[in-house]
Image (cartoon, rainbow, N blue to C red):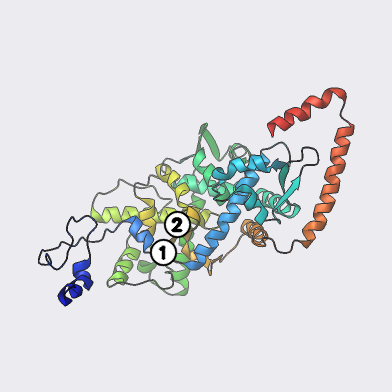
Amino acid sequence: MRSPLFKILSNNTFYSQTSPTSPFTFGPFNFSIQRRWKKPADTAQTRLEFRTRDLKLDFFTSQLRKLNIALQLFDLMSQRRRPYVSVQIMSRWTNLVGLNVSMGDYIGVYPHVFEVFTHPVRKNVCCSVTRKMMALLEEEKVVMKECELDNVRRIKKLLMMSKEGMLHLHALRLVRRELGLPIDFRESILRKYSDDFKLVDLEVVALVQRDDCLAVANVEHWREKEYREKWYSEFETKYAFPMYFPTGFKIEIGFKDKLKNWQRLSYVKPYDREVKRSRTKAGIERFEKRVVGILHEFLSLTIEKMMNVERLVHFRKDFGIEVNFRELLLKHPGIFYISTKGDTQTVFLREAYSKGALIEPNSLYNVRRKMLDLMLLGRRNTKELKVDKVSIEERRSAATDKSLESTTDGDWVIPLLERSDD
């Protein structure tokens, strides 16, 4: 029978807890041994885990992930010769688009976006894009064409922020959708506007001439408004950034004073040429604030004021940034927010969002919002889809019969080769 003293000591957390790296078990017979407590590590990973979460932005991120997967599938399907793809071929793209379920289960959840049918000749299950979604994709292309001059301005501003006035095209391709660029932006924008851009190499674009009229950051408009409407002094607003902390954010002792000093800290602005970097503590703080200004302006140029952190890292060399992106973003929770929903890390410009929606939406954002609303319908309101499906099948079978009637004796090789391709 155990003694009462043993029970008390074993139930005491001070004596019963054991370090995972310690070979000793602290109990009633060795409680006099001094135990060294380790200070918890303060790293980017720990700050990411214990940050104050914004549930509305997290929910919006999980919804956007569904749309991004669908848009990636549309890009892959558009590379095929026909307007439909067999589900067997689409199953090979599961890992490519980042799906954690089977392709058949995924496309079956969104009947307003994907149309699944049986091929009238080959009798295999195929998939195509519905008329509603195809109309929205065409509308997106029209809006991109109308915003061509805005796209030119965005690329010029990015080149002006870069270290040498040059950017790698592979980095621009990764953020093409975030910047609202068409899929053929190399030909339709870079080569078309040869007075503004030049291709130094096959994968490098450079700025022909700097435009000082564009060398004004988006945050400067906010500073001017704060100075004019709230009567703040120039000393308070000249280098300040808008701060919007999430609900439930814990303000520690001394945080307000540190934030006030950081807001007043001078720095080299994104479109100004940086002088030699100082290795002093103040010089490092000014360099980090310059990086914050570059990231703030970069996110302001995007369509949805958000971007994948992994894609953002590809601009590190071009912008001359020598700090840890994720660590710097977590250091300023009032300016940026990192969401980890969907197995990715997405950074938001906090000032641009309110209640999980963009405060100042643009035409391209509105089109993508319609696409998202169409996906969020799921399997609801599918009665009208049945009527459309009957008419589509009639047209498809008529087109198949017509193609078979026009086939001559020597044309039997062509459908055989097409079948082997699919």
Q: Nearer the viewer, residue 10 or 363?
A: 10
Mark 1 → mark 2, Cα distance in angstroms: 9 Å
Residue found at the far top of this picture: 410
Q: Which mark is residue 241?
A: 1
**Residue type pointed to by label 1:** Phe
Residue found at the far bottom of this picture: 4
Whether residue 65 appears in this view of the structure is yes
Q: Secondary structure at mark 2?
A: helix
Provide residue 275's location: percent of width, then percent of height.
33, 47
Provide residue 225's location: percent of width, then percent of height.
48, 69
Task: State the quadrant of the N terminus.
Answer: bottom left
Q: Residue at x 63, y 52 (%)?
A: 105
Residue found at the far front of this picture: 1
- Work out whether mark 1 precedes mark 2 in sequence or the reverse, and give the earlier one: 1
- Report the side of 303 relative to 290 (left or right): right
**Residue type pointed to by label 2:** His
Provide residue 397's location: percent of width, then percent of height.
85, 43
What residue is shown with label 2? 296
Asked if disc 1 and disc 2 are in contact, CB closer than 8 Å, the reply is yes
